[in-house]
Image (spheres, rainbow, N blue to C red):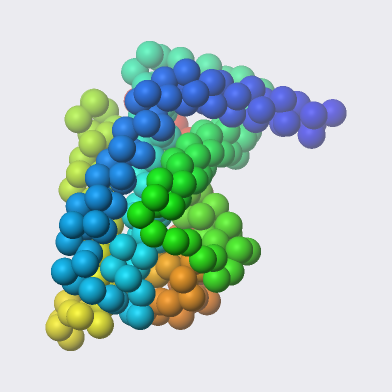
Amino acid sequence: MRLRENWISFYTLFRREMVRIIRIWQQTLLPPVITMSLYFVIFGDLIGPRIGTMGGFDYIQYIMPGLVMMAIINNAYLNVTSSVFGNKFQRNFEELLVAPMSYANIILGYVCAGIARGLLVGVAVIFVSLFFTKISVNDWIATIVIALLSSALFSIAGMINGLLAKKFDDISIVPVFILTPLTYLGGVFYSVDMLSPFWRSLTHLNPIFYIINAFRYALLGYSDVDLVPSLFIIFVATIVLFWVCHWLLKKGIGVKS
């Protein structure tokens, strides 16, 4: 009986979030696809031929995994943080806390919807990339696992941001001042081997660097770092952030205050 109640509560929250994503698809799905298309045009067709090859691949093919992962990360994050803060602002998040739902179920409902949006946008970007370059998947299992873990990680991070945010400006601070710089400096457009020793060492402290390279290995079979340590970092970070999010809900931080 308890299992059935947990499933109903999770499915209800997840379905509500998915309806929101689909209903306003012009805001949730279309803009990131257009943005990534511009990246392919500018960096692929216009700048790519001048750069030549990187890692043994055409430049546009080299940056494709990074652009796909960038789309997945950003949309998974923004979906959850905007939804959680919106529910707080409308004063209906408290209804979830008093409902017969566990904190884990609340987290999973939001996070799974964030994963879904991230993957939907990622698939759309992959489809767009077919107009610019060919795609060869090196490891299907690794591709799926990395995409799921990465979108889950940043969905949870987005929920933490949404819980802690006190005004609308707060939900844009992390994406603008932390997420975007780490993404652009995470090896999307270049190989770490091109950097000086100082910047190369600094790049290895960037968690998004491992995510992008793991995804690049899954698709192209090429990476600046080994796959196993990258997967370990992503998995551990996901577990840690899930615990932090669960603790915030349990203490009511950002919700009851």
Determine whether 110 is above or below 135 in the image.
Answer: above
Residue 30 seen by the camera: yes
Q: Nearer the viewer, residue 183 or 104?
A: 183
Percent x, y for residue 163? Answer: 38, 34
Q: Quadrant of the N terminus?
A: top right
Residue 72 seen by the camera: no
Percent x, y for residue 188? Answer: 29, 63
Q: What residue occupies the far right of the structure in this picture? A: 1
Determine whether 47 is above or below 54 in the image.
Answer: above
Res 37 → quadrant: top left
Q: Quadrant of the C terminus?
A: top left
Residue drawn at (20%, 44%) of the image: 176
Residue drawn at (37%, 31%) of the image: 30
Does residue 23 appear left or right of residue 163 in this picture? right
Percent x, y for residue 64? Answer: 37, 59
Does residue 40 appear left or right of residue 163 in this picture? left
Does residue 43 appear left or right of residue 211 in this picture? left
Determine whether 201 is above or below 118 in the image.
Answer: below
Res 85 → quadrant: top left
Percent x, y for residue 170? Answer: 23, 34
Q: Nearer the viewer, residue 135 or 218?
A: 135
Residue drawn at (66%, 28%) of the image: 11
Residue drawn at (39%, 59%) of the image: 133
